[in-house]
Image (tube, coloured by chain):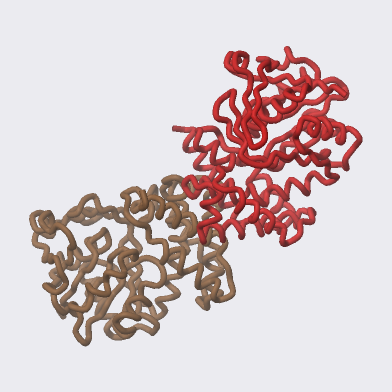
Chain colours: A red, B brown
Amino acid sequence: MGFRIAVVGSGAIGSYYGAKLAHAGSDVRFLIRGDLSAVRRDGIFVRGEGENFRVAKINCYNSTKEIGPCDLVIVAVKATSNCDLVDLVPPLLNERTMLLTLQNGLGNDEFLANHFGAERILGGLCFIALNRASRTEIERYAYGHIILGEFSRAAQPRTHEVAAEFNRAGVRCTVVDDLALECWRKLIWNIPFNGLSVLAGGMDTAAIVGDNDLRKAALALMEEVIAAANKCGHALPSDAWHKHIERSEKMGGYKPSTLQDWEAGRPLEIEPIWGEPSRRAIAAGGQMPRTEMIYALLKQLDKARRSR
Amino acid sequence: MGFRIAVVGSGAIGSYYGAKLAHAGSDVRFLIRGDLSAVRRDGIFVRGEGENFRVAKINCYNSTKEIGPCDLVIVAVKATSNCDLVDLVPPLLNERTMLLTLQNGLGNDEFLANHFGAERILGGLCFIALNRASRTEIERYAYGHIILGEFSRAAQPRTHEVAAEFNRAGVRCTVVDDLALECWRKLIWNIPFNGLSVLAGGMDTAAIVGDNDLRKAALALMEEVIAAANKCGHALPSDAWHKHIERSEKMGGYKPSTLQDWEAGRPLEIEPIWGEPSRRAIAAGGQMPRTEMIYALLKQLDKARRSR
């Protein structure tokens, strides 16, 4: 059908999914703030189980004004840079432009809805283990699929069109009617593993699952997330953690994105993963004691490092 | 009355209280494992508000066999070295020797009771902010008093005699009938501040109290400790945290002992401060979610560092 697609945010997620779509022939335009030369020269390499390709010619731009209006804008900046979107997004919009956030945690879709209108917003949950080896090289360790939904409403015809675009590019993409529920479901994994991996001094998923006390802490956090989701009106079954711990056991030693950010000296996505969920739970009359503590500690670690 | 006193453990606590007693003329014999020469040459200096003295002649020994039987053994080793006591203590015992643990947290008195008989054991809670600047120099920043009690029974005449010995030496020492209750009361402070100070990347008490989120985490931990104490049958009033947060506000920037241990590369006293309390709460049908998480994280940080 020929979407014109903009990718805003060229970290691991934006680069990988953008490259997949471009490799399949979609019209993809990357916003790359900073130095374009490496991507212009080398394109983007993708390596992973069952895939190994290079997109030699990447359409990349320094500003969204040069990109101009698109049908679909993939938002893949770190949530810590969301405020930049207020200026970056408008040149990409026509009346029907869809904004698809592929970001972690809660609150990103609301942010976009508040600024650009709720009816534009879709959210995609990425179940993928990536590592950006360099600006032009993306390594995929596991998975890859996206769960796609509309912000605050059931799936629409366009939701299926976007999903078809991804599926055509070899990215498995499933449409759901209740995006918020799936966001909470994903947090069952992110809240414990992203947090404990940093606070325990740099542990990967295998090490966390393999340590008795940390595994217990992870399970307790999972139960806490499930209880909070239910308190907020998102009906997750009480054994929903089971699949997640199984997945982690099979995953091997993967470094969650927050640990990758921490080790690379990048700011941490603390608000969407720990701040917003615990605030919502408290507003609904619940509590997330472990999550709140992770929030306070990570916030302090992040702040202290940036003030150095 | 002339107690013969042995001090086992020559960290900040053992050195300070031992020096105070020796300075007042008590017969104090220090076990110093490792190099005796600095203490033999320089004695022990104590500096603090209203006190500034040197005990020139320290009776120090390399082995408890040389010390021989005493009336009172002050146990001030790190709880992580408790297993060493099994061999160190017996040469110090006659039929009536009292063992006084000045250690942090829960379980130390039980450990001594199991090995040497419950009727010997007393416990002292030290409310003091110390820094051991070197093997021979102790700096006292705040407080100094001891709350003294018998293990598993009300105060005895001998309890008051020991308290009198401390008071004579200028150490305020109060006798209580319910030592276990006071141990839990002290944990209201130690569980949050000792733990958060390390996990937040090296923050002193003033910084914790001054940070909104960490202060909230500290308060939530205090409430958790009070609830656990009550679950375990130790009746702490629900507003018992109030005095503690006030005290911390007045305290200025003090590094809790666990942070001092962490920065000096010493093993952390994890079991008595976080492990044992949470196990007891769970055994009593309660839970300490935040404390358990601190436990798992500190244990991992400590283990990882020691395996490097």
**Residue B79 or B73: which is nearer the viewer?**
B79
- The answer to whether B281 is drawn above or below residue A159 in the figure is below
Which percent across, then down, holds residue B286? 58, 71
Measured along the vertical axis of the image, is residue B265 above or below residue A110? below
Give the camera-side residue of B12 and A273: A273
The answer to whether residue A60 is visible is no
Give percent across and percent down for residue B303.
40, 55
- Residue sitting at the far bottom: B95
Q: Is residue B129 visible?
A: yes
Residue B123 appears in which quarter of the rendering?
Answer: bottom left
User: Is B261 placed above or below B80 here?
Assistant: above
Q: Point out the residue furthest to the front here.
A: A50
The x and y percentages for residue A180 are 78, 46
> Could you tell me which residue is drawn at 71 percent across and 59 percent down?
A227
Which corner quadrant holds the N terminus of chain B? bottom left
Residue A271 in the image, given as x and y percentages of width and height: 63, 41
| Residue A105, quarter of the rendered image | top right
Residue at 27% across / 69% down in the picture? B84
